[in-house]
Amino acid sequence: MIVIGIDIGSVSAKGYIISNGSHHRTIVPTGWSPRDAGQAIIDQLLDATRIERDQVERIYVTGYGRVAFEQADKTITEIKCHARGIAELYPEIRTIIDIGGQDSKVIRIGEMGQVLDFAMNDKCAAGTGRFLQVMATVLGLDVSELGGAEEPGQMQMISSMCTVFAESEIIGSLARGNPKGGIIAGLHQSVGKRVAAMARRMGVREQVAFTGGVAINQGVKRAVAKELGTRIIVPEACQYTGALGAALLALEKG
């Protein structure tokens, strides 16, 4: 059986194809059209695996752009897909933190990957990839550079998580001559505090899986681990867990 799972996020679209037990994955920028991004994912996966479109039995799609993708056999919530993906990779994990471009989520799952509870921040940019992207621009950096540029030993606390106020706060801190690396560390700490507060409400058990594009940022990982006082596991394919979960659910016809 051949199935495809696609996660169309606000920043990037990710895809997983499962063909007779073998896996292949790909990622593309979402751009202005979730529909085109989803099609690009399918094209790349089929080209890489030399599989014909009519050989694919099911395509399941998740993510914010899922409603725009008409080729889907089924659309599924990100919550369910991330839970299934992490259950496959780390069966012992019971808490998932996912930070994407537009929202942050904490998901509590059971032994079989079933969703027991979740909390989501999708009303404002605070604590999301978009928030970090705006702050990186203020600091004259690419968002991918933040993790390596922080200096926790010179931390400058950022008191506001509102994008507008935090931007003004950072500009003022730079004007006072505070070190950029210390400002970045404070920024990461602010994100960590906000996400950790959501996680504590869900109940944290031992190890936590951290997924989404922001999980690549080692500074945010450090901050979340410090706030929760627990081990944070970042999967090697942390951006793909939603797409993997969608593919697995398609395989299981879930």
Image (cartoon, rainbow, N blue to C red):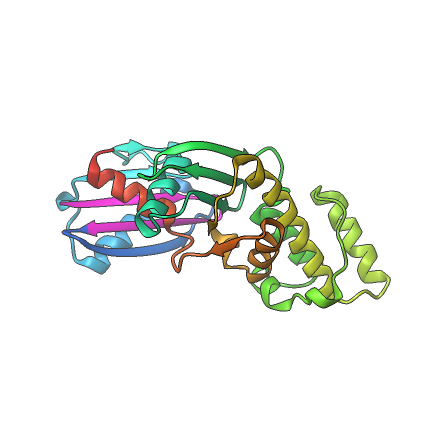
* Main SS class of the magenta portion in the image: strand
One can see residue 221 in this view: yes
Residue at the spot x=16%, y=53% of the render? 51
Q: Quadrant of residue 174?
A: bottom right
Percent x, y for residue 20? 14, 51
Magenta span contains residue 245:
no
Residue at the spot x=55%, y=62% of the render? 218
Q: Quadrant of residue 77?
A: top left
Q: Which of 24 and 114 is in front in this view?
A: 114
Magenta span contains residue 7:
yes
Q: Is residue 3 left or right of residue 117?
A: left
- What residue range appears in magenta? 1-18
Q: Nearer the viewer, residue 50 or 99?
A: 99
- State which quarter of the image contains the C terminus: top left
Residue at the spot x=68%, y=54% of the render? 187
Percent x, y for residue 45? 26, 54
Q: In which quarter of the image is residue 109?
A: top left
Q: Nearer the viewer, residue 142 or 160?
A: 160
Residue at the spot x=19%, y=58% of the render? 49
Q: In this view, does 108 lie above or below 210?
A: above
